[in-house]
Image (cartoon, rainbow, N blue to C red):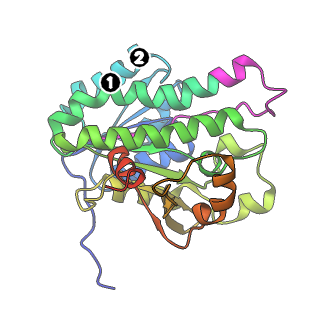
Amino acid sequence: MASLEPLRFDGKVALITGAAGGLGLSHAREFAARGAKVILSDITPDVKSSASGIGDAAAFAVGSVTSRADCEAAVAVALEEFGRLDILVNNAGMLRDHTLEKQTDAEWQSVIDVHLTGTRNMTLAAWDALKASGAGRIINTSSASGLYGNFGQSNYCAAKMGIVGFTKACSQEGRRFGINVHCIAPIAHTPMTDDLWPDEMVKAATSPELVSPVVAYLSSEECQENSLILAAGGGYLARVAVVESAGVRLAAGEMLDAEWVAARFSSAAAMAQWAEPATVAYALDRAFGR
């Protein structure tokens, strides 16, 4: 396979949330090493020392993604310090794991607020600056838990799958402005997983540094795809897609009732032939046979 020229971000500015440590700090270091200026945003004041460790290429913003004002302040740091914003990586997250019947309203809402609403808040705050860039990139962070579900994480799963839908919508709205939007489902050991993962998983190749190069590629002008969902971690990379079977259709003169569904369900559910609807309009065209 022919080697590519090194991907560079000279003259570009990237804002990363949840960047005091873990994946976010790894992403920031990756961008800085490739020539970008970076703004590290996090709710903890520790983000200041994290930015200092990167050097003159980095600035920081302390605030919560649950606050619209804090998100706007983080974007303001990018514009004041470096004059522009080209890349946004929505990475901030937290866990409040309990089964549905044991989960409190506060545990549900706090996870939705940070992951889903936080992603929306920072994206909205950055939107005008990314439009001005002419080639803006947004990388959102979902999870295998969101894509496939996970016991004891209904709040987290709902938020993370919501981010997939949010990504799809923003990719369509941003296309006319040159903004491409993608979503990663990372597998990495971070402080958020300290109490969850057994030692053998922690010792495996699950460092954040095995996810950040994927974020760098998706953020580059080399990547002309849009609206991708990528699973990445431990040296593994794969595309994930929402697909639809070939389906069955009501024939002229037939009546749709539960018995009709039962008789044809196996054919409707068979995945030997499938398509990946790119938009709601495409899905409707398939449904109505146009």
Residue 7: image quadrant is bottom left
First in sequence, mark 1 or 2: give its number.
Answer: 2
Asked whether 229 or 36 is in front, the reply is 229
For residue 286, say whether it is visible.
yes
Q: Position of residue 131 (x, y in %)?
A: 19, 35
Q: Magenta residues, as a range?
A: 86-109
| Residue 229 inside the magenta-drawn segment | no
Tell me: residue 248, above or below residue 190.
below
Disc 2 designates what residue?
68
Amino acid type assigned to the residue bearing label 1 in the image: Ala
**Which quadrant is home to the N terminus?**
bottom left
Label 2 crowd bin: few (<14), some (14–19), many (20+), radius 10 Å: some
For residue 38, say whether it is visible.
no
Task: Residue 106: give its label.
Answer: none
Q: Position of residue 275 (x, y in %)?
A: 43, 63
Residue 17: image quadrant is top left
Q: CA distance from mark 1 to mark 2?
A: 7 Å
| Residue 89 inside the magenta-drawn segment | yes
Q: Secondary structure at mark 1?
A: helix
In the rendered image, the residue lying farthest to the bottom is: 1
Tell me: residue 38, above or below residue 183.
above
Q: Residue at x 17, y 41 (%)?
A: 176
Task: Residue 125: give its label.
Answer: 1
The reply to whether the C-beta atoms of the residues labelled 1 and 2 are less than 8 Å apart is: yes
Q: Position of residue 130 (x, y in %)?
A: 23, 36
